[in-house]
Image: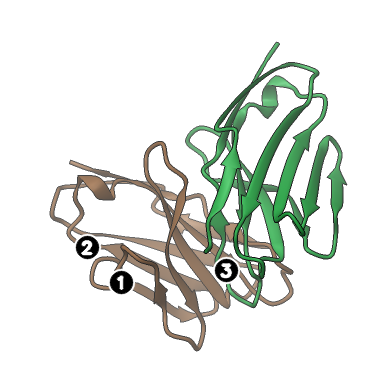
Amino acid sequence: GALVYQYPRRTICKSGTSMRMECQAVGFQATSVAWYRQSPQKTFELIALSTVNSAIKYEQNFTQEKFPISHPNLSFSSMTVLNAYLEDRGLYLCGARGPGQGYTLYFGAGTRLSVL
Amino acid sequence: GEQVEQLPSILRVQEGSSASINCSYEDSASNYFPWYKQEPGENPKLIIDIRSNMERKQIQELIVLLDKKAKRFSLHITDTQPGDSAMYFCAAANQGGSAKLIFGEGTKLTVSS
């Protein structure tokens, strides 16, 4: 079956430092990966959408300079939160889909970021 | 626009009764509508979805309805159990090949016994 592994599950970083999270698709080709953030008491905000062979598209309020994303192949994507501050804390989720998976978006377990 | 509105934000029901959550969307090109259940500390899990070529879909106690004309869709949980207590999120997407989902604000469902 299709699975998405995301790691780390939890991380704590000092204010102003950066942290990287990774997403691995297993059992399917992740042609499209979306990164979301769920801030405390909020819904899921789309950060950016990465489709193989296309430029990564960032949503309003999110930039490549702050959340650089790499999607080098059909099974892996990573995102870094640069210079993390209190407002960056939350649950970060990667969702992936690919050909043969229909419309289903498979989510990783999420990376919960705390900032001290 | 791309907003998805979800109501109610909080829903409390008695065990055995039905629970209904309603969503509306703005983008008339949306053609895929999944529902996710999120338990505390966990990632959201897909529980049921419906595509624009359908008006109704049922998986066991879960029923989703889609009214494309009104741009509304809803989730109905029949015979609710305490284990159904969780956050529920609706979402909408234009599945032109991307993974972009627009989520509703979520509904906190509490089923009391």
Q: Colour of chain B?
A: green
Which disc is residue A68 wearing? Answer: 1
Provide the residue designation for mark 3.
Answer: B99
Label 2 is placed on what type of residue?
Leu
Label 3 is placed on what type of residue?
Ala
Residue B96, placed above or below residue B78: below
- The residue at the point 39 percent across, 52 percent down is A8
Give residue A30's position: percent from left, percent from top: 58, 73
Tell me if label 3 and label 2 are in contact, CB under 8 Å.
no
Q: CA distance from mark 3 to mark 1?
A: 18 Å
- Within 10 Å of disc 3 (Cα), the crowding (few <14, some 14-19, many 20+) is many
Tell me if label 1 and label 2 are in contact, CB under 8 Å.
yes
Between B36 and B30, the one lying in front of the other is: B30
Which disc is residue A82 wearing? Answer: 2
Q: Secondary structure at mark 1?
A: loop
Circle 2 marks a residue in which chain? A
Is B46 positioned to the left or the right of B53 in the image?
A: left
Discs 3/2, front:
3
Give residue A19's position: percent from left, percent from top: 26, 58
Q: Colour of chain A?
A: brown
